[in-house]
Image (spheres, coloured by chain):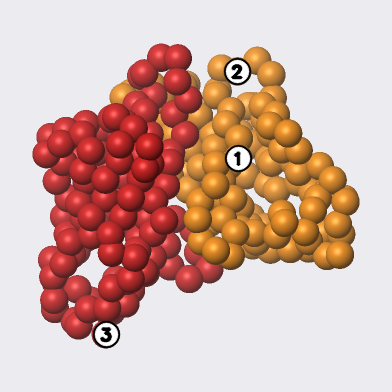
Amino acid sequence: AQKITQTQPGMFVQEKEAVTLDCTYDTSDPSYGLFWYKQPSSGEMIFLIYQGSYDQQNATEGRYSLNFQKARKSANLVISASQLGDSAMYFCAMRETYSSASKIIFGSGTRLSIRP
Amino acid sequence: NAGVTQTPKFQVLKTGQSMTLQCAQDMNHEYMSWYRQDPGMGLRLIHYSVGAGITDQGEVPNGYNVSRSTTEDFPLRLLSAAPSQTSVYFCASSYSPSTSGVRNEQFFGPGTRLTVL
């Protein structure tokens, strides 16, 4: 069965440091996609980055990169040079893509707080 | 494009009342879904749809009904509201993963904050 686990309920990081948010997943589907979303205190869901299971390289989007380790079933988000505006909830999500009838489920999230 | 729109933004119900949360998207997305988010928690999937006329249950479907008569609209019905349904409800849409040449991340509506007394 499809499952997403985020084991860090909360993290504190000093401004300008890099931070890694953990995400592990479980699926029996050979084809899937992994997503990261940011939810600031205002409540909206902001898409950050996507990694497909067959992608040869780790995804990058500006200061965001995804450390994808397929054998370990992990898809950690790395934020380089953290900023105060990065303080938010971060959610990992997964979609099995082998079938078109694929649902997207989310992990429980990590609350990231950036210290000035 | 308006993206994904949800109405109402806020709603207060009494236990036992019924209501419909509206969701619409103008991006011609095949896939639409409803989530609930309880305070300090993640998003739990209620129902989803892969196209007009096709719906399926998610992780927490009890107490909710959906239908998908058009590509654009995906309303969520609360049949008999209970205090346990107090939550923020998000609607989202995306292309189907079988659609080639497009990214299939979900676009979210702004959410509906529902309180059941």
Q: Amino acid at mark 3?
A: Leu
Image position of B7 (left or right of A9): left
Q: What's the residue at 34%, 32% (across, down)? A: B27
| Secondary structure of residue under mark 3 | loop
Numbered label tally: 3
| Label 2: few (<14), some (14–19) or many (≥20) C-alpha neighbours in 10 Å | few
Residue corresponding to mark 2: A55
Q: Which is in the foreground here, disc 2 or disc 1? A: 1
User: Can you give x and y, in whole percent of width and height, for residue B62 in the image?
Assistant: 21, 60
Work out whether residue B52 or residue A35 is closer to the camera in this orientation and state it: B52
Secondary structure state at the residue bearing disc 2: loop
In this rendering, the answer to whether A54 lies above or below A6 is above
| Chain holding disc 3 | B
- The percent coordinates of residue A101 (x first, y second) are 29, 29
Quadrant where the N terminus of chain A sits is top left
Q: Are marks 3 and 2 in contact (CB under 8 Å)?
A: no
Identify the residue position indicated by label 3 in the image. B117
Q: Tell me what hue chain A is rendered in.
A: orange
Q: Nearer the viewer, mark 3 or mark 2?
A: 3
Q: Residues within 10 Å of mark 3 (few under 14, many from 20)?
A: some
Q: Chain of mark 2?
A: A
Residue A34 image-quadrant placement: top right
The residue singled out by tag 1 in the image is: A48
Three-letter residue code for mark 2? Asp
Q: SS of the residue at dot 1?
A: strand
Q: Residue at x 59, y 50 (%)?
A: A38
Residue type at mark 1 is Leu
Q: Is residue A46 visible?
A: yes
